[in-house]
Image (tube, coloured by chain):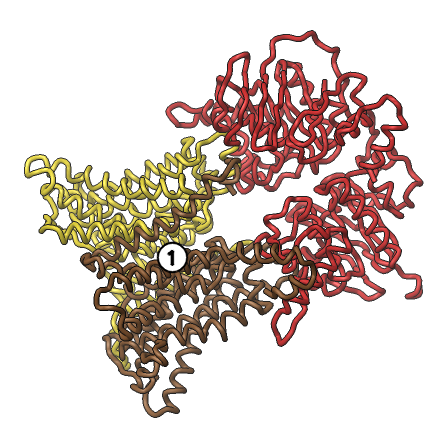
Amino acid sequence: MATMVMKRLDKATMIAFGCSILLIAIGAIAEPNFISSDYLLQQLQTASFLGIIATGVMLVILLGHIDLSIPWTISIGGMMATAATGFFGETLGPFLAIPFGLACGAAVGLVNGLGVAYLRAPAMIFTLGMNAVAQGLMVFHTGGFAPQDRGLPIMRELATGRLIPGVPNPLLIWIVVGAATIFILTRTTLGRRIYAIGNKERAVYLSGVDTRRVLLICFMISGACAAAGGILLAGWANRSYQAMGDPYLLPTIAAIVLGGTNVLGGRGSYIGTVAGVILITLLQSILSVIQPQLFFAELGFRVPAEVFRQIVFGVVIISMLLLYGRERLQR
Amino acid sequence: MSVESGLSTKGGRSWEAWGHWFTAQRGLLISLVIFAIMFGFYAWKLEVGLSASMVNTAANKGALLALVAMAQTIPVLTGGLDLSVGMVFVLTNCLAASVVNGDPRMTALGIIVVLITGLVCGIINGIIIVYGRLQPIIVTLATGAVFFGVALALRPEPGGSVNFEFADFMTTSFFKVPSSVILLLAVVLFIWIPYRRSVLGRAAYAIGSSEHAAYMSGVPIARAKIMAYALAGFLAAIAGLLLTALTYSGAAKASLGADYTLNSIAAVVIGGTSLFGGAGSAIGSIFGAFIMRTVGDLLIVFDINPVLQPLFVGIVLLFAVSLGSLRLLRIKNKLDLYR
Amino acid sequence: MTVGTAPLLRMEAITKRYGGVRALEDVRFECDRGKIHALLGENGAGKSTLIKILAGVVQPDSGQITLDGQPISFNSPAAANAAGIACIFQELSLLPDLSVADNIAITRPPMRFGLIDQGAQRRLAEEALARVGGEDIHPLAPVGDLPLSRRQMVEIAKALARTPKILILDEATSALTAADVTKVFRMLKQLKADGMAIIYISHRMHEIAELADDCTVFRNGRYVETFAAGTKSDDAIVEMMIGREYSSVFPPLPEKKSGGPSMLSLKGLSWAGQLNDINLDLKAGEVVGLGGLDGQGQRQLLLALFGTLIGVTGTIEINGKAVKMSNPGRAKSEEIGMALIPEDRKNEGLMLPMSVRDNLSFASIEGFSRFGIVDRKAEAVAIDDMIKLLNIRVGDIDGPVASLSGGNQQKVVIAKWLMTKPRIILLNDPTRGIDVGTKQELYELLRRLAEGGAAILFYSTDYDELIGCCDRVLVFYNGAVVRTLEGAALTEHNLIASAHNLPTSTKAGAAQVFATEAAS
């Protein structure tokens, strides 16, 4: 059993987890509070948003495609959920808000899936186009009338409450979503087919599988996951706004790839993605603890904190991938 | 392509040569026609008529994206992708707003520094991709973040300035031809066409077509890839210079870089270059870029709220890629769908 | 030893390992100017590895190579090219999006003012094509648009355009038409007369008999023997290759059974001008071969039956009931029970990086699942049975299928489909590029399956196979069945004659003409 677990945890996952622990250690030296359970729990809660969003994108990447419509699908999820009372009224709205937000996200995924699977359009371009369309629709939505943009109590509860004492709700949701994803990937025919399509869709088709349906399902899951992230973010911030999804595209893809998933599809484990998500989250928060800009300000260089966030982000991704993401020499 | 040799060898075969040329350039020609129709319609609908300054403005807007799209084309031809072009564009814009200044000598030196910076960014991308053996998408995603970080460090607040003669020169018209269009022509004539006909340029197509076969054929893969990304950085730097001349300042805006990166990919595809590599042309990307910009102009003509521009750009993009699906109607063996 | 007597190329004590697997062990090989040297051996004997070393694709772990008496080593194909070694590979090394001329001149294009001289390049391509007899190919056509046989001609022209000292052909003729083979052979003989050294690899014994001056046999990564061509019988050579007594490869054909109801019957099946009015009755327990020259519609028939072709007209009846074959999923369904063993196992049969286990159960996974959840115990039991049944040699069942040998990979493809318990089995040239030992096992398997009640449609490019395995053979020509050969009429001579759509003859003399025509 132990060997099974070790086998599962491939090199990428181990290194990503290892680096996370290293980051915590560095943080603890700089700021003793860093290692408190409260702080770490808060980190996990922040990671949950990214983790839920990354779940769907990972499935799409495993298929050998990509979903660039994530930013505005997040916004659609958040904005449609907050606007639900406007559409359905004060009594029905609160009940339908979350399903409605999820359905809107899944609808974006549906169109993506139809385009990629049935029209055989390149996913990178088609989802890019859908991102612009989603953006346009949301602009139209806010331009047409004054929409309800406050988070509903139920969304707020979902994002900030603790159904199980000590476990923030978003983390709980991530655990449930993650467990379901692991089950799908390892134990179901759908999971087998996802990996297989990422390796050789032609062979999968000739094995009598309707590969288009698998693509469609995964794009819909990706849309729904992004919308779920949007709903939680709207609840967390207690309001929704247009560009709320913008900062999430790059960290999502980075987290998945750092977790050892091949960007070209076919290979990757969900545990790896979890490791990648935690690593990215810690990386972003540790810079706000260490505050390198203060050090540079003492030297006379006044630079925004964002500079370090960006540079460290880029350098860490490349150096980690140089450690384990290299392709074998073509021979 | 030398048509003369086609005529000289075997008379009947010259038509075949034209046929192959036409097939190879089909994507480019389609994008040219679509652009001509869209722009013609725009000019016709415009009640006040097309003034020189409007042409100039339209050309400038289009040229920025066209340059970034040309930059994007070259890595795409190798089967890669450069998600950092937009950030190199922003970085060189911020840099130019500081160094392209002062007397003519200093200005010239500044321009050279900016171009070299772009080139170096590209070479860094290329070296990491080739010798690090990493996926271009993820490498350029990461280096893009670094480039943006540097841009932000250079220019935390929007501002800076640029040599006015230089800026005027870049934004004026010569014999009613906007200098941005002349710049594009110059880039095509002195950079793209020689590159296309060089060994490394053809190697880029070869790698995109089949990297394994290219390796087996003794194509210099490492050099060709580094060259492709280097050239992408260089062209993005030219775009950064033009932006500085147009705005008289530099600004490190992440959304600007991301916009240009994503739109450049769209322009490349609309321009007829295959995202899988091996086929296409940077000239097509120029028309692709102008098509995307004309969508915005058409909205004004039709009196549609300009904030809806993304919606229409998105629809044009979806429409463009869905056009490619027409080939599905001709497919008689479903296996051809699954490569 | 003086330089004058040293051979052009000498390889000594070459050893190459991949991980723990030994591909070549202390091997030697020599070849000389003006000679065609055939390299023989089963798949996995080490021929390909030796060629890859010569072509600079892989480097040997130890050993010496001398060219013209000078020690050499190549770290890339470019270096091997520069030294005058050109390879024509089984897997094409062509760039599909580039023009024929670009491909032919890819390594050292003619230059002018630092740029590629398009006109000179085109003339160079035309000359090279004319030399190999491919004048019909337009130098500006994109290679990807050419049919396979034309592409192979471009590949040969490309190798020749480099004016190599040593030319290596690795199964280079397998995709060519008979007429092309004639041209290529004539060209090879001319090159030999001009003093080029040629290394020739082929599974077709008659080609080697016609061309080779010397032969070297490898077995299991070791050197066995070098001898002058024509000094050993075919049987003796085959024995050398497989290292054991080589008796009849084909299991005996059973007595002709009286006809039962037909499981699969086709009436007037046509498609896109490539299939014309095909009629067929296939009964349980029958093995029916599809013969004829390569590319006459045999593959299309199998694909039409498996539901991948659009616009097929005519009727397909399964057990007397007309059905519409819309996709492979339908063909696989319980109601129809069809399986297709595809020709290209790397792209159509297997997901190479995935485990042997996942590949084996992939087509039959629904059978081991409830509500989409896989019963892994039932799956493991079925997989174990199948591995035993087909005698598949797997190191690690959870390791990637790519690590298996070619023959074992093919067995995995077949096993994957047998796990669906098919009643109608379509085989698309399943033995191409597989060693003799595995072939023999497959022939026996086919017979066992037929005896078990399956109906089998078997396309092969190997005439011996059709004669040895099939109850009858439908010979295709231009998308139509021109003749059905059965019993005593099922001979190589008749197969070849029918393949060219010429009358079959009992007179050996007449058939002999056609036989030589195809073989030469």
Please name the residue that numbered disc 1 is placed on.
Answer: B34
**Residue B339 shows in this picture:** yes
Residue C231 drawn at (x, y percent): 93, 40
C201 vs B279: above or below: above
Instruction: Describe residue C25's horizontal placement relative to residue C375 as left or right.
Output: right
Residue visible at 69% across and 46% down in the picture = C90
Q: Which residue appears at 33% of the width and 70% of the height?
A: B59
- Among the chains, which one is yellow? A
* Quarter assignment of residue A94: top left
Count the marks: how many? 1
Seen in the picture, residue C73 relative to B112 is either above or below; the reply is above
C223 or C173: which is nearer to us?
A: C173
Q: Which chain is brown?
A: B
Residue C309 at x, y = what percent? 53, 31
From the image, state the color of chain C: red
- Chain to which the residue tagged by mark 1 belongs: B
Q: Residues within 10 Å of mark 1 (few under 14, many from 20)?
A: some
Q: Is residue B313 above or below residue A30?
A: above
Going 42% across and 31% down the picture, which residue do you hit?
Answer: A189
Return the residue nearer the eye: C197 or A331: C197
In the rendering, at what x and y percent does residue A156 appear? 13, 46
Q: Secondary structure at mark 1?
A: helix
Quadrant including the N terminus of chain A: top left
Depicted A280 relative to depicted B5: above or below: above
Residue C47 vs residue A51: left or right? right
Out of A187 and C130, give the one closest to the viewer: C130
Give the amino acid type for the residue marked by disc 1 in the picture.
Ile
**Residue shown at the point (40%, 87%) measured from the top left:** B108
